[in-house]
Amino acid sequence: MESRIRQTEGGVTAAKGFQAAGVEAGVKYQNRKDMALIYSEAPCKAAATFTANLVKAAPVQWDRQIVDHSPFVQAVVVNSGIANACTGKQGMDVCRAEAECAGKLLHIPAEAVLLGSTGVIGMQMPLDRITAGIGKLAEARSDTLEAGHDAARAIMTTDTVPKEIAVQFELGGKTVTLGGMCKGSGMIHPNMCTMLGFITTDADISGELLQKALSADVPDTFNMVSVDGDTSTNDTLLLLANGRAQNPKITAEGEDYDVFCEALHTVTVYLARKMAGDGEGATALFECRVVGAADKQDARTLARSVICSSLSKAAVFGHDANFGRFLCALGYSGAQFDPENVDLYFQSENGKIHIYSAGCALDYSEEEAARVLSAPEVTVLADIHMGDAEATAWGCDLSYDYVKINADYRS
């Protein structure tokens, strides 16, 4: 059956009525874009999820207030290089000044401006450079796909590639578009969402259902990603809907809501996988798919345990079919299962190999297993044989470069 969701070009500017920009502001980096803007020509409903870390950056605290209490949102200002985390009252004062500056230049209330920051924790923000950057962003904003791409590049820190996608679908005879971008490469172990993620749509949908769709999606997408086990202070995922598609407004669950959720899931899975595969120093996307679990939570727990294991990650980097590491990670996850009734497989574009069954290693070729594990995307498939639940988690291998990147991060 043909999918109801089709991928199209672009990212956050693909949906009607959205503009973006990315500029060089010199916040911390030199000679690269480091500030981004997303702007909607019409007021938006907003939904969000934020970090579960008790240490929350100033922009996270600002955004939570805006999403909870502001009647609408119309812009997002993001900087890379400095996280504005652990910065006390001065950090919150900077947030207020940023929002007021953007509001004045864009002719919208300061309470309609959301913020995002990523980078070094503990550094104070250079407000003069930030406000000058906002001026450049306001002037440069455009609805072109290239403007969206510029924004996706500007939010990168140690990322090696920008991450963006857009999809289209039909609601009530109207074409609806949903596009997104995210950044994340290190300090990635979301316990709410992604590091910084921004999704825009021209769908007409109530704020309550927008939040419900996002909150329901996150546990099986961004919350199933881990690069290094560290949950950031700045994790923010924002979803803005401006209604410009003029579809019949989604005010209740039903077929239109289901299609919207399917489109949202398509975007978030794509971005989650891209983020995991671009983990600091990574040479491979490391995926664990658990099937046959007793329930959904057990499936999630088992899959996350495998991709979070440093020994499993190192085995993928070394193309080493040391299946005991993967079984060990399943065993200490906290989920209950019978180790004598597990089937374990390795699979990739290079093939699929059955590695373990009925409590014992199978007679497999080490050379063939190494070939399967040497692909740029590697999957460990575990069949638990206890039920019908399944889940997939995404991570990356653990290379020498991870330590080098993080040992030098502040310099």
Image (spheres, grey):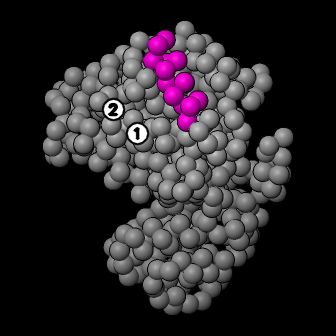
Q: Is residue 271 something that shows in the picture?
A: no
Percent position of residue 126, x then y: 69, 26
Q: Which of 408/342 is in front?
A: 408
Which amino acid type is shown beneath numbered disc 1?
Answer: Gln
Q: Residues within 10 Å of mark 1 (few under 14, many from 20)?
A: few
Q: Residues within 10 Å of mark 2 (few under 14, many from 20)?
A: some
Q: Which residue is mark 1?
A: 65
Residue drawn at the location 37% of the way across and 69% of the way down: 296
Q: Main secondary structure of the magenta part?
A: helix
| Magenta-span inclusion, residue 64 | no
Q: Which residue is mark 2?
A: 70
Q: Is residue 42 something that shows in the picture?
A: yes
Percent position of residue 19, x then y: 45, 18
Q: How many marks?
A: 2
Element carrying mark 2: loop
Percent position of residue 282, x then y: 71, 52
Tell whether label 2 touches label 1 (CB within 8 Å).
Answer: yes
Left or right of 41? Residue 126 is right
Left or right of 197? Residue 120 is right
Element carrying mark 1: helix
Q: Which mark is residue 195?
A: none
* Residue stretch rendered in magenta on the structure: 92-105
Spot the residue most to the top.
139
Which amino acid type is shown beneath numbered disc 2?
Answer: Ser
**Residue 252 higher or lower than 347, as above or below:** above
Residue drawn at the location 67% of the way across and 31% of the way down: 125
Percent position of residue 343, x then y: 51, 79
**Residue 400 higher or lower than 408, as above or below:** below
Left or right of 355? Residue 173 is left
